[in-house]
Image (cartoon, grey):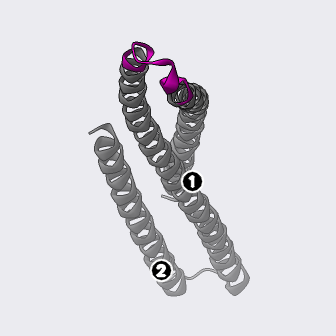
Amino acid sequence: MGHKTKFGVLIAVIVALLAFIIWGQQRLKTANEDAFTYKKALDSEAFAANSKDRLIKEKQEEIDVLKEQNKMLRDTIDALKSEVVRLNSNLRSQGKKILANQKLMKEMQIREDSLVKEIGRLLGLQTANRGAIAKMENERLEIGKNMSELYEENEYLKDSIVTETVAKEEVSEELALKKKDFLKLRIIRL
């Protein structure tokens, strides 16, 4: 259920980002229209030719800078979105691996319990059964070894999930900062 919630949050974040970028592009379009309107106003005024050209050029240079900054921010946001997707994918994959290992450990525990009971039964039989007892004891020891390895692997995966979660939070914070920068650029341009 937790993975579904994370995935839903991720989808919501991506949709919000796309809406934010579309909004930014609309604002850029508005700036271009304002520049065009400004140019027409300048044409209608009785300014000197050199002064008019200089003001138009400055306005165009400002728009070009905003366009470049907008492009860089979009690229950064896209990269951060990809990183969030990758981290979520890693978290889901590691969670599934832990569940699979836990299931296998449970099955092995059931088998070990069964073998212990069987060993106890065989111990009450004749000496001829010693070979079968030794074989089962070896199998039980091998299962114990495998369970220890699986336990260590689960501990590693849990540590990895913590690391990936911290990395995801850091990326999300960076993404939030980039969004603020994006808004600041829009405010400056307006």
Residue 41 badge: 2
Give the image quarter of residue 34.
bottom left
For image coordinates 60% across by 65% down, the residue present is 75
Is disc 1 surrounded by few (<14), some (14 to 19) or many (20+) residues within 10 Å? some
Q: What is the distance, in whole Å, between disc 2 and disc 1 at their CAs? A: 46 Å
**Along the line of sight, which residue is nearer the eye, 35 or 179?**
179
Q: Is residue 19 above or below residue 156?
A: below
For image coordinates 42% across by 42% down, the residue present is 100
**Along the line of sight, which residue is nearer the eye, 89 or 84?**
89
Left-right relation of 53 to 80: right
**Along the line of sight, which residue is nearer the eye, 41 or 59?**
59
Residue 130 included in the magenta stretch of the image: yes
Left-right relation of 173 to 8: right
Residue 83 badge: 1
Q: Main secondary structure of the magenta part?
A: helix
* Amino acid beneath label 2: Ala
The magenta segment is 121-131
Q: Is residue 2 above or below residue 179?
A: above
Q: Is residue 9 above or below residue 160?
A: below
Give the SS element for disc 2. Answer: helix
2 or 1: mark nearer the eye? 1
**Along the line of sight, which residue is nearer the eye, 160 or 102?**
102
For image coordinates 49% across by 77% down, the residue present is 32
Q: Count how many numbered circles sit on residues in the image.
A: 2
For image coordinates 44% across by 14% down, the residue present is 123
- Percent x, y for residue 35? 51, 76
Give the image quarter of residue 138.
top right
Give the SS element for disc 1. Answer: helix
* Amino acid beneath label 1: Glu
Left-right relation of 61 to 78: right
